[in-house]
Image: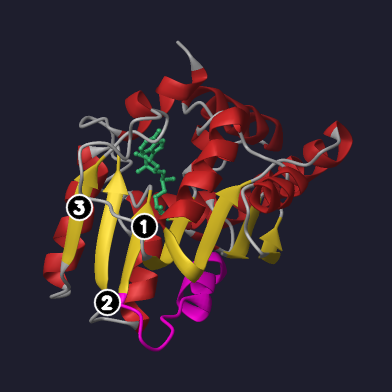
Amino acid sequence: MKKDVRWKKFWDNRKSKLASDYSNIHDIYIQKRGEMLSMFFEYSMFPANTPKKFLDLGAGTGAAGFAVLSRFPDAKALFVDGSEVMLAEAVKTADKNKLKISCLLRDFSSKDWLKGGGIKPGYPLIISNLMIHHLTDRRKAVFFREIRNLLAPGGLFIYGDYLRMADNKTEDYQCELRALDILKLKKEHGWKVPSLKDEIKSIKNTEIKSGDMAPTPGFVLASLRKAGFKKTAMLWFYLKFGVFIAVK
Ligand SMILES: C[S@@+](CC[C@H](N)C(=O)[O-])C[C@H]1O[C@@H](n2cnc3c(N)ncnc32)[C@H](O)[C@@H]1O
């Protein structure tokens, strides 16, 4: 199966607990997840005289989008994702917290994802967390341009993702440190604790199963600049995860 369609089988799977148990699972597999999500809370903003609306691309169950909404509960949020199962969980969370969100089903690996209406340019804020690594590098570069075009002048793009290091030795060590963190968290949460070697093997298997194409920080920053963003920066980084900000 091609890497850029594997995400669908992985994330839009009614039989898997990935959506219904997303937070519990990802509190273990995404180290310092709270810190990562806090970047969306801290850096999101709506300049005066702009509509308070934002797009969450690859919103899934809504972790990053709800971080923004916890700061701006009256903002108009449009959650876009390719998985009905994940978006259904986001709707449940919104209902439980009396928040209003709109949802759209789209496949970002298709160049036609903006066709069919529903998303018009002029957003002061667009966010995306842990989705773009499912796109090929070529598609990532085009996607950054599409995001830039959807932003209003001066608009912000806050982007978190699963990353890889440019050299294999550093990547292997980052991966080992991440696996050690996962083992520690599994122990704390009373999960079965495998050996370090098995945990590393399982990380690699998940990367294959979900069709991960993690970008390097250098690729992200260079591609954002090439896409025409005026200012770019890396806000936060830990082991295999990073959050970036870019200004149109
Ligand atoms: C790891 S989850 C991240 C969810 C959420 N943004 C968060 O911060 O927890 C990845 C999400 O990206 C979505 N996704 C991956 N590839 C996609 C694609 N090509 N088109 C649309 N959605 C995609 C999946 O359906 C899934 O909901």
Horizontally, is 126 left or right of 30 in the view? left
Provide the residue designation for mark 1. 56
Q: Position of residue 220 (x, y in %)?
A: 68, 48
Cα separation between marks 2 and 1: 12 Å
Q: Position of residue 52 (x, y in %)?
A: 30, 77
Horizontally, is 123 left or right of 154 in the view? left
Provide the residue designation for mark 3. 103
Q: Quadrant of residue 68?
A: bottom left
Tell me which residue sits at (51%, 32%) in the image. 135
Magenta stretch: includes residue 61: no
Tell me which residue sits at (50%, 34%) in the image. 134
For disc 3, the neighbor class at 10 Å (few under 14, some 14 to 19, many from 20) is some
Front residue of 94/246: it is: 246
**Chain part drawn in magenta:** 35-52
- The correct choice, above or below, for 26 with respect to 188 in the image is above
Cα separation between marks 2 and 3: 14 Å
